[in-house]
């Protein structure tokens, strides 16, 4: 059976340190409430996947949290920027003999298990799978061998990331999943009643 791995990158959910662009509009506590909700949603979405699962923490590994250590391998993110951190996580996965690796963000209200399963399925006939985000980045990246250059020389957090990544992969077969909206600013939640209900009035 093919060895598949799902990687999730997460920030430790601490007041004032998550969703800082969103917090500028709704306050630190409300931004933390929303981020915790999205973390729980991500955990539920991938928990039942047949793939192995690895969680990479931004600051330090936590053992008593929503990510069950019996289900999730736990690691520290290593590198000076997001690209190098992802590169090191993929390297680690391939060095441990995984054949298909998918990394997914932890701030997607619309993510569901079908996106994960489709990504692994499309890797049967494609070199790379990308889940485009509406802001010009991507919420998912899947590979069956390491394409190091996609992690280098990017302006992470800007609207050119996906375009530059596709340019790096112009000689590869790339499948694009449906476009989703990751949650970064108030504009991303203004029409979402569930997330808006998590805004507290005493911020």
Image (cartoon, rainbow, N blue to C red):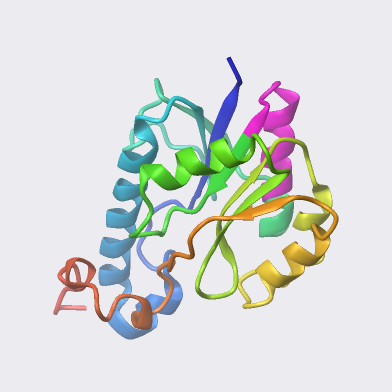
Q: Position of residue 155 (x, y in %)?
A: 72, 72
* Residue in view at x 58 percent, y 27 percent: 4
Where are the magenta residues, as a range?
Answer: 86-100
Specify the farthest residue to the front. Answer: 125
Residue 12 seen from this side: yes
Any magenta on residue 88? yes
Q: Is residue 80 above or below residue 192?
A: above
Question: 184 above or below 32?
Answer: below
The answer to whether residue 5 is above or below residue 196 is: above
Q: Position of residue 64 (x, y in %)?
A: 34, 33
Main secondary structure along the magenta-highlighted residues: helix
Q: Residue at x 41, y 24 (%)?
A: 71
Q: Quadrant of the C terminus?
A: bottom left
Q: Pinpoint residue 158: horizontal percent, then vertical percent.
A: 63, 76
Instruction: Report the label total.
Output: 0
Q: Is residue 124 left or right of residue 193?
A: right
Image coordinates of residue 176 in percent, x first then y, are 59, 57
Point 73% across, 43% down: residue = 127
Quadrant in the picture for the N terminus? top right
Query: Is 126 on the left-hand or right-hand side of 147?
Result: left
Residue at the extreme top of the image, as rendered = 1
150 lies left or right of 27: right
Residue at screen point 32% across, 69% down: 31
Query: In the rendered image, is residue 79 in sight?
Result: no
Identify the image quadrant of residue 94. Answer: top right
Would residue 196 be counted in the magenta stretch?
Answer: no
């Amino acid at each position: 059976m093919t060895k598949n791995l799902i990687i999730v990158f997460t920030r430790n959910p601490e007041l004032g340190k998550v969703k800082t662009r969103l917090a500028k509009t709704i306050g630190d506590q409300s931004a933390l409430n929303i981020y915790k909700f999205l973390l729980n949603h991500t955990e539920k979405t991938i928990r039942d996947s047949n793939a192995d699962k690895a969680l990479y923490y931004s600051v330090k590994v936590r053992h008593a949290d929503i990510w069950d250590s019996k289900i999730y391998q736990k690691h520290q993110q290593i590198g000076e920027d997001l690209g190098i951190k992802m590169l090191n996580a993929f390297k680690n996965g391939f060095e441990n003999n995984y054949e298909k690796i998918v990394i997914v963000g932890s701030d997607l209200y619309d993510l569901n298990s079908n996106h994960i399963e489709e990504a692994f399925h499309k890797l049967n006939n494609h070199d790379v799978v990308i889940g485009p985000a509406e802001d010009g980045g991507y919420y998912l990246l899947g590979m069956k061998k390491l394409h190091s250059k996609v992690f280098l020389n990017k302006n992470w957090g800007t609207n050119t990331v996906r375009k530059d990544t596709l340019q790096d992969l112009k000689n590869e077969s790339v499948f694009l999943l449906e476009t989703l909206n990751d949650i970064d600013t108030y504009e991303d939640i203004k029409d979402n009643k569930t997330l808006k209900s998590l805004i507290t009035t005493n911020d």
